[in-house]
Image: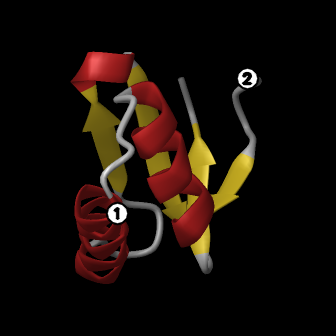
Amino acid sequence: MDTGMIYTIEELADRMNEFGHVTDPKEQAGNLSFTKFLHGSLKEGGVWGWPAATEVYKKKGDGFERLL
């Protein structure tokens, strides 16, 4: 994946599920709830680090931009 890529909230939740090999629908729904909460909690331009995946995202509009 390239940096600078923009993900919707749903796409980032799907990325988390793929990375963690999450197949349980309740856990997948939990990841979606988390990304919605995260998006709502950050100010525009706020950053979030995902240490397990060594990725960093910035809130951008209705989604997240991957910085690293």
Q: Residues within 10 Å of mark 2 (few under 14, many from 20)?
A: few
Side (left or right) of 59 relative to 54? right
On the image, numbered disc 1 is attached to which residue? Answer: 25
Mark-to-mark CA distance, 1 and 2: 25 Å
Q: Residues within 10 Å of mark 1 (few under 14, many from 20)?
A: few
Q: Residue at left 46%, top 56%? A: 13
Find numbered disc 2 in the image and state the secondary structure of the residue it sits on: loop
Q: Position of residue 31 (x, y in %)?
A: 30, 59
**The label number, if any, that marks residue 62 in the structure image:** none
- Three-letter residue code for mark 1: Pro
Q: Position of residue 57 (x, y in %)?
A: 46, 44
Question: Can the viewer see residue 60 in this picture?
Answer: no
Side (left or right) of 59 relative to 8? left
13 relative to 3, above or below:
below
Find numbered disc 1 in the image and state the secondary structure of the residue it sits on: helix
Q: Residue at left 50%, top 35%? A: 18
Residue nearest the viewer, comparing 12 with 38? 12
34 relative to 49, above or below:
below
Residue nearest the viewer, comparing 38 with 23? 23
Residue farthest along the front direction in this orientation: 24
Q: Residue at left 53%, top 42%? A: 15
**Nearer-N-terminus badge (1/2):** 2
39 relative to 66, above or below:
below
Q: Residue 55's quadrant in the figure?
A: top left
On the image, numbered disc 2 is attached to which residue? Answer: 1
Side (left or right) of 64 relative to 44? right
Q: Nearer the viewer, mark 1 or mark 2?
A: 1
Q: Position of residue 58 (x, y in %)?
A: 48, 52
